[in-house]
Amino acid sequence: MKTLEQFSVCAGCYHEKAELRFTRREIVKRKDGAILYLKRIPYYWCEKCGEETYDLQVEVFVERAMKAFEEGKVKPGAIDVGAEFVSSRSAVQ
């Protein structure tokens, strides 16, 4: 499992006391009738401005999975991105 970077300042509004929540989202990619479902993608969300901030490792993992699917190197189905990453104290169950 990889450890996610802990953010303390919002990347959008730069507010030092912005409350960043560790939540999850999903992406569905379709190609020629096939579906790739990337589930439980972790990201931080600022309640003040709504900015979504992704850990670089998560962003690279998602981009590579989508590219591999487009190139036919990944079979259609579900990938649990959240299972690949663990936050030290803020892990979403």
Image (spheres, rainbow, N blue to C red):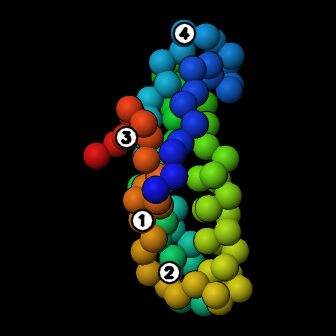
The percent coordinates of residue 64 (x first, y second) are: 67, 69
The percent coordinates of residue 74 (x first, y second) are: 58, 84
Distance from disc 3 to disc 1, alpha carbons, whole Å, reads 14 Å
Q: Is residue 67 left or right of residue 90?
A: right
- Residue 91 got which mark? 3
Neighbourhood count class around disc 1 (C-alpha, 10 Å): few under 14, some 14–19, many 20 upward: few
Of residues 38 and 7, which is closer to you in this image? 7
Badge 3 or badge 2: first in the primary sequence = 2
The type of residue carrying mark 4 is: Lys
- Which residue in the protein does label 4 denote? 17
- Is label 4 or label 3 in front? 3
Distance from disc 4 to disc 1, alpha carbons, whole Å, reads 31 Å
- Which residue in the protein does label 2 denote? 35
Q: Is residue 76 left or right of residue 12?
A: left
- Where disc 2 sits, the SS reads strand
Q: Is residue 88 left or right of residue 57?
A: left
